[in-house]
């Protein structure tokens, strides 16, 4: 028996722009469409090689163009791309909700799909009735569903409302029950699209754990998410879609790198105010990856160009790494008690952290410049040098709490001999000093 359970060949999907919305189909029509789906799949497979995409017109758009890939039994594969790249369209084709304009998809095995909140649920039916309905659609016998029922309800955490019509459910309740049904009714292939978009952190973690367990049991998972940390933790192979085309198929770390390379470069990555006579005239963060992306555990460098109109007695510079919720995450400072760098004019200072432990997220810097001896405060600059930390493949084990702020002893401060504006790749370290610890 072949190990290939999903085979996609030259799939293209065209939509008409501005077409009238289809009326909502009746329950009988939906059931008829589901029954006839295998016939449509066979027809598509027979003539897929002969059906070619038509030329673009002003009133059409290609959501997918010539997409081909294979997935083996037991693989857990990520699918990433920006909004509008075709991810959801591809999943709808694989789930037999819509047909491709050209090409075909051959799927071997029972498929469980979680495409969006409430997909496949009938609002007038209760949660209990929808569990049995979804199992029946998947081809399971009533006895099989009954054996799994209690486990599904317990996982979904909606026991109190299981006999309530799902039209009264919140989006979070919909998602909990829908995921529990899709993951527990023994699908041989599980298609999951943005399961983490709704729900609290505890349930998201439980969902990720369940997806991992499904894969360990030898079943196949195709996983779509904008949460790149989840993709990197769960998968070893990832597909990258860009404007309807498959642009990368390979190991997840490389796929995420290709995806991030398409992001718009941060326009204000470097801070410059060259005309100041006293203050921070320039600053930048040197990350391990391009486009101000830094990988957890790698060397992280901060550089500050400082100007003094008059030589201070004891130059003192500090900076704080601030997260998106404006919390201080890391505080580092350097007091020039030995007159190593304090002088009139400009000096470039470098702070190097050999193995940065800043957790994943987006950050900015706030700097302070003063004279430690006279207590004279020169300047505070806030919200500069944005950068992002990623943790591809590193499990999430903790999060910052309110008031947490780390003071590091392994960071090294030193003046370097050229100005920030020259941006030489190699800089000579003139001296090194450890920051004080609070």
Image (cartoon, helix red, strand yellow):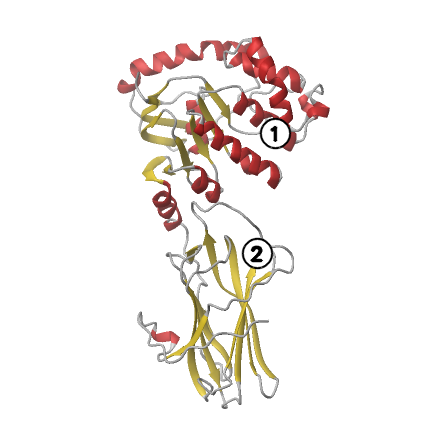
Determine whether, in the image, residue 40 is placed left or right of residue 406. Answer: left
In the image, residue 55 sits, relative to residue 329, either above or below, namely: above
Residue 21 place in picture, x, y as percent: 53, 24
| Quarter the C terminus occupies | bottom right
Mark 2, secondary structure of its residue: loop
* Residue 216 in which image quadrant: top left
Residue 142 place in picture, x, y as percent: 57, 9
Q: Nearer the viewer, residue 228 or 60?
A: 228
Foreground disc of the pair 2, 1: 1
In the image, residue 438 sits, relative to residue 403, either above or below, namely: below
Residue 77 place in picture, x, y as percent: 40, 33
Mark 1, secondary structure of its residue: helix
Q: Distance between the residues labelled 2 and 1?
A: 28 Å
Residue 56 seen in render? no
Q: Which of 334 and 228 is in front in this view?
A: 334
> According to the image, label 2 marks what residue?
324
Residue 98 place in picture, x, y as percent: 44, 21
| Mark 1 burial class by Cα count in 10 Å: few <14, some 14-19, many 20+ | many
The answer to whether the residues at label 2 and label 1 have Cβ atoms under 8 Å apart is no
Determine whether, in the image, residue 246 is placed left or right of residue 392. Answer: left
Residue 150 seen in render? yes
How many marks can you see? 2
> According to the image, label 1 marks what residue?
176
* Residue 118 in which image quadrant: top right
| Mark 2 burial class by Cα count in 10 Å: few <14, some 14-19, many 20+ | few
| Quarter the N terminus occupies | top left
**Which label's residue is closer to the chain start, 2 or 1?**
1
Residue at coordinates 57% horizontally, 9% vertically from top-left? 143
């Amino acid at each position: 028996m072949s190990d290939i359970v999903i085979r996609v060949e030259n799939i293209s999907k065209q939509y008409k722009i501005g077409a009238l919305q289809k009326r909502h189909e009746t329950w009988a029509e939906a059931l008829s469409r589901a029954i006839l789906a295998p016939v449509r799949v066979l027809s598509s497979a027979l003539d897929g090689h002969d059906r070619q995409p038509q030329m673009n017109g002003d009133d059409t758009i290609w959501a997918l163009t010539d997409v081909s890939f294979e997935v083996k039994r037991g693989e857990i594969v990520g699918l990433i791309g920006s909004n509008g790249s075709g991810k959801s369209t591809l999943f709808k084709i694989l789930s037999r909700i819509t047909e491709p304009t050209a090409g075909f998809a051959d799927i071997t095995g029972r498929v469980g799909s979680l495409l969006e909140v409430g997909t496949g649920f009938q609002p007038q039916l209760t949660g209990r009735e929808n569990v049995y309905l979804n199992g029946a659609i998947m081809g399971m016998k009533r006895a099989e569903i009954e054996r799994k029922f209690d486990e599904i309800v317990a996982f979904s955490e909606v026991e109190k409302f299981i006999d309530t019509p799902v039209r009264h459910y919140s989006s979070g309740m919909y998602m909990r029950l829908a995921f529990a049904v899709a993951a527990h009714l023994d699908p041989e292939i599980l298609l999951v699209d943005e399961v983490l978009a709704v729900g609290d952190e505890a349930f998201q973690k439980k969902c990720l754990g369940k997806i991992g367990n499904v894969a360990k049991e030898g079943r196949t998972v195709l996983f779509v998410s904008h949460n790149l940390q989840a993709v990197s933790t769960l998968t070893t192979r990832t597909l990258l879609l860009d404007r309807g085309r498959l642009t990368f198929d390979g190991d997840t770390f490389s796929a995420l790198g290709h995806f991030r390379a398409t992001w718009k470069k941060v326009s204000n990555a470097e801070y410059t105010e060259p005309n100041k006579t006293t203050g921070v005239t320039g600053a930048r963060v040197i990350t391990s990856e391009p486009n101000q992306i830094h990988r957890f555990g790698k060397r992280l460098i901060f550089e500050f160009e400082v100007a003094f109109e008059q030589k201070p007695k004891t130059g003192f510079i500090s900076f704080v790494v601030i997260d998106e919720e404006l919390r201080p995450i890391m505080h580092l400072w350097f007091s020039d008690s030995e007159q190593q760098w304090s002088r009139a004019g400009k000096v470039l200072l470098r702070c190097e952290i050999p193995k940065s432990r800043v957790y994943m997220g987006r950050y900015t810097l706030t700097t302070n410049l003063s004279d430690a001896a006279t207590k004279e405060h020169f300047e505070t600059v806030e919200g500069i040098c944005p950068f992002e930390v990623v943790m591809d493949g590193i499990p999430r084990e903790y999060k910052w709490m309110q008031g947490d702020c780390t003071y590091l002893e392994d960071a090294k401060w030193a003046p370097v001999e050229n100005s920030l504006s020259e941006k030489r790749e190699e800089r000579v370290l003139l001296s090194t000093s450890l920051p004080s610890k609070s």
